[in-house]
Amino acid sequence: MPNWFFLLVPVAVLLGALGLLTHRLIHAPRWRSRRARLAALVGMVVLTGLSFLQFGAGPTFLSPAQARPLVWIGATWLATALYLLLGALVMAVLSLVLGWGNRERKTRVNRIGAALVVVAALATTAYGVVKAADPTVTPMTFRSPALPAAFDGTKVALITDIHAGAVRSAATVQRIVDRTNAAEPDLVLIAGDLIDGPVDRYAAELAPLRGLRASLGVYAVTGNHEMYSGTISGWEDDWKTLGIQVVSNAVTTVTSGGDSMAIGGVHDWSGTGEFAPDYDAAVEGVAASTFQIVLAHQPRAASRLAGRGVDLQVSGHTHGGQLWPFRALVLLQQPMVDGQAVIDGVPVITSRGAGAWGPSVRVGADPEIPVLTMTRG
């Protein structure tokens, strides 16, 4: 199908949502001020237009720093619109029930309800903005009898889904680096979706990753948004200049106290051609007795790694749903949302992510940096 066809879907959804909001929040309450109705409609149309800026590189005639406020506003509007829509649907039901057979009462219910919905949506979005800006370290414990003695007690920080670019700046990345380093990990694993956009525009946003400190090294694989960037190799080359070892479709070994551990990874599930995930390459040459960690952006990759001797898979992608009530929808695509699980015999740890995609808003899915303490047992 042509690319423009896939653009029609979000456009149709946004226009439909805009139409519903116009009806429920402007027309149904029968506001008397024509200017207020017009201003509300124009405002929603402008915000909806700005929301499309996040899906590309932003207005490229502006620098990323200059464009960011416009992109941020448009992206944040999507979260607000979601909660306006949910509230409008509740209001529609209440209006039908409470205003049945009485037009004047129905108008009053609509008017009061519309005001309450707007206040609730703005408050929820504001709460989500504050939460999204505060990624916290989540202590976890991973136990395995296969873990070599020298790695008993090793601390592993898992960073995923920063989505730096048009909306999130280097300041966000620096905050994540500072909090990761404060946890004093021995090993840092980065499971994809570091960026949103091309390397020539947003490389500076990831520069703080150079400051990550871990005695056993920093390792990374691609996510689906690296695939969307159109500059996959460019991003991998950029990561290497930051001191990050790329293990997409590759495997390496780290040693400590005479013991060794394999760290492999795969390109994202969505990759094609030379960037398609190669699950054999992630474990190639690793002895059955060697403890193996595999980085795979999406948790469902575990189904392809089953039976290959993987002792632990680390993933992200899900964002924990990011915005309530989307958490339940994640399970339509992925076998888990966050935390620890065993998928087809493979232990998997999935992070909600340290950043956010689209709006810098999180409701019911706080951003996190899991720090695993690996123990024998």
Image (cartoon, grey):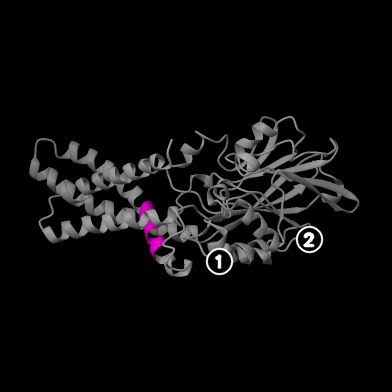
Residue hosting label 1? 170
Position of 88 compared to 51: left or right?
Answer: left
Residue drawn at x 26%, y 53% is 116
As drawn, the label of residue 100 is: none
Position of 98 compared to 129: left or right?
Answer: left
Residue 334 quadrant: top right
| Magenta stretch holds residue 187 | no
- Residue 113 image point, x, y percent: 22, 49
Looking at marks 2 and 1 on the same chain, the residue that comes earlier in the sequence is marked by 1
Residue hosting label 2? 215
Quick one: quadrant of the N terminus?
top left
Residue drawn at x 77%, y 34% is 309
- Pick the residue in front: 218 or 266: 266
Q: Which residues are drawn in magenta? A: 70-79
Which amino acid, mark 1? Ala
- Residue 21 image point, x, y percent: 25, 47
Asked if residue 290 is positioned above or below residue 75 in the image, the reply reads: above
Q: Residues within 10 Å of mark 1 (few under 14, many from 20)?
A: some
| Magenta stretch holds residue 78 | yes
- Pick the residue in front: 150 or 353: 353
Dominant secondary structure, magenta: helix
- Residue 121 image point, x, y percent: 33, 53
Mark-to-mark CA distance, 2 and 1:
24 Å
- Label count reads 2
